[in-house]
Image (tube, helix red, strand yellow):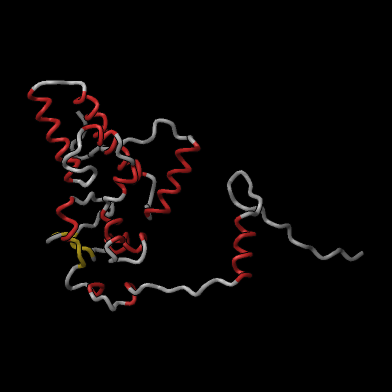
Amino acid sequence: MGDPRRSKNTWNKPAHPWQKTRIDQEKIWRRAYGLGSKSEIWKMTSLLKKMKDQAKILAAGAGDQIDKEKYQLLKRASKLGLIKEAEGLDAILGIPVETVMDRRLQTIVFKKGLARSMKQARQFIVHQHILLGNSKITAPGYIVHTGEETLINFVPHSKLASADHPERAILVRAPKSAAQEQKEAERRNAPRGRDGKPFRRPLKRAPRKN
């Protein structure tokens, strides 16, 4: 028996650490959802995998206990907003990872317009500016239930509760000039090394004097 004071992770790392397709996809998710580390992705994928594994086992069984567990699994998935109430186990097997990522508190705070970017939404949550009902939630990866979406708001005594706060103002960027767009295109199309970084141009040195 392990030490009860040292809890273990409830999520699993990828089985193979070096898979280019998975690593590239994780980079896209990290940028799109403003994640702090890849472990946040692995938590969501582990949660989804457990639900799908349970759905596969229940789909092959029969009996009163199986029917009860099916009802509980479908109710939980619909409560988390992953499927609709009328859908069955096949809907659980077809849930993509993006659906789970969209149910994170950080994502919903951004989509509700309480923050102007995913990273800012993460900052507001971690700094205890977001209230879920009567509780402060400081975990950006908290899975929001369908009945809790309307309860998300700023803490009343927080300065960010005012819509006129400068951190909540939507920034309007000036359009880029043709020269700036051309420079960015050259930077994107520049040859890169194995590490993905562009090659550095060699420094021009003055000729030596004899």
The residue closer to the viewer here, 9 or 180, is 180
Q: Which of the 4 image quadrants contains residue 205? A: bottom right
**Residue at 30% across, 39% down:** 95
Q: Is residue 44 left or right of residue 85?
A: right
**Residue at 20% across, 46% down:** 80
**Residue at 23% across, 39% down:** 6
- Compared to 78, does 2 lie above or below? above
Q: Is residue 145 left or right of residue 200?
A: left
Q: Position of residue 133 (x, y in %)?
A: 13, 60
Q: Is residue 89 left or right of residue 208?
A: left
**Residue at 20% across, 41% down:** 77
In the rendered image, the residue lying farthest to the right is 210
Q: How many marks?
A: 0
Q: Position of residue 186 (x, y in %)?
A: 64, 59
Q: Position of residue 200 (x, y in %)?
A: 67, 56
In the rendered image, the residue lying farthest to the left is 64
- Compared to 98, does 63 lie above or below? above
In the rendered image, the residue lying farthest to the front is 86
The residue closer to the viewer here, 205 or 139, is 139
- Compared to 158, does 10 lie above or below? above
Quarter that holds the C terminus: bottom right
Quarter that holds the N terminus: top left
Q: Position of residue 23 (x, y in %)?
A: 46, 41
Q: Which of the 4 image quadrants contains residue 7? A: top left
